[in-house]
Image (tube, rainbow, N blue to C red):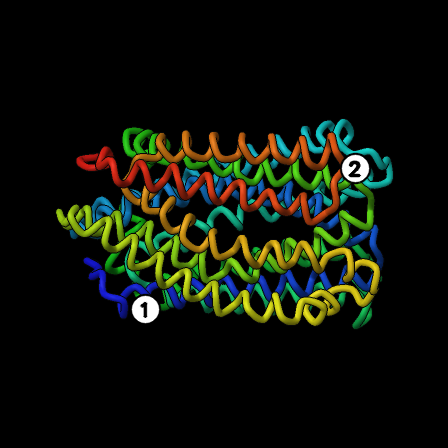
Amino acid sequence: MKLSVSNKDIIRLAAPISLSLLIPQINFLTNTAFLGKLGERELAINGITGIFYLIISMIGAGLASGVQVQMSRRAGEGDIHELTNTFTNGMMLGVAGSLLLMLLSLWTAPLIFGYSLHNSEHVLLSVNFLYIRVWGLPFLMLTQLVNAFYISTGRSKYLIVGSLASTATNILFDYLLIFGKGGFPAMGLTGAAIASIIAEIVYCVTMYGLFYIKQLHRIYPVFSYYHFDAELSARSLKVSSPLIVQYLFSIGGWQIFFIFVEHLGQKELAASQILRSVFGIVGIGTWAFANTCNTMVSNVIGQGKQREVIPVIWKISKLSLLFALCVCIPLVVFPDVFLSFYRDEPSIVALAIPSLRIIASATLLMAVSTVMFNGVVGSGNTLTNLFIEITCVGTYLVYCYVVIERNRMPLEWAWGSEFVYWTSLFVISYIYLRSGKWKGKVI
């Protein structure tokens, strides 16, 4: 369970994570393209509600990341007993948290959309969509936790299997339920929500099924730790809570961005939904390397090799930047080819092209800053991560308010906010890591 920090081992851990992220993005791309065939309104609503659900799911991701840091540290120490106990308690926390989030979402969605959106039809459609969509949350949070276990124990290749099963399920049921194929009724947005829930159930069952098919329950006897450990849960929440709040700030800032864009008009919102999908695809390798950095930093600290932390962060940053460069060049050269796949409407494609070039450029900066930031996460100093995130999102929102809400500048200026955010993230994370204040953190 102890990881080395060679380029070969970095890529061996990052490649399956990257592929497991690519597969759902293909699903998201297909989903966006399907809804784009229905019209601008459906495309716009999917963008708003998708960000809202992403905010909720990021709470689960924050919990999973905090538990992953702990499991990676235990893996580096070779402590299977505590690793298993941490995983089991994480699952219990995930189930309880998901049920609470479902109730909170059902109550807050009408209030948030009612006060923030200008179009009353958008409000009604968004609320109805989310009332269905949130039922997949418990399965999603359990999947996030088992994925964190696989990554922390060096078994990231298993993520590919679950991603394939989930994506194939989602694309199939999107096609059947959105358009009413195969004897199913044409349900439009509602069909997209139901398809996503089915896919999340399949993903969860597949990932936990692998745990038993691969006989991992013999190495990590989860049923031996079925009792709730309050002390361990408190430690998990201590590490995870800042990450949860951090993700809320991060994705919440994006939700506000899309609300501001909705005020510009439906066409701008539809174009931005397409751009969000493209952004998700180009960022796949970066997020995979960032997750790898999180795990490797925590693991080498667990091995007592703190001197290797900064070198491994730079090594992963260079690989991430190289990957981003290879992905972004085709986007800059052939932007209309990518955009036309979603919606073959010249006015939307023309509107989105300048912003797409902005996104491609910002991705190069993101490739380094995200890895750097996850190096801070891996050190266990999650309160510092929260401070960094609040500062960066605050700067980002000030820019969005002035440029989009106050001055109603063109869409490409709105997406220029990505440069503001990623630059801030890089500078502050770099300064903190160079200071050495992360050394000696016990989790």
Callout 1 amino acid: Arg
- The residue labelled by disc 2 is 263
| 3D distance between C-alphas at marks 1 and 2 | 44 Å
Residue at 40% across, 66% down: 158
Residue at 81% across, 64% down: 37
Q: Residues within 10 Å of mark 1 (few under 14, many from 20)?
A: some
Please indicate, yes or no, whether residue 120 appears anywhere in the rendered image: yes
Quadrant containing the N terminus in the rendered view = bottom left
Of pointers 1 and 2, the one earlier in the residue sequence: 1
The quadrant holding residue 413 is: top right
The percent coordinates of residue 345 (x first, y second) are 83, 64
- The residue labelled by disc 1 is 12
Residue at 68% across, 29% down: 107
Q: Residues within 10 Å of mark 2 (few under 14, many from 20)?
A: some
The image's mark for residue 171 is: none
Quadrant containing the C terminus in the rendered view = top left
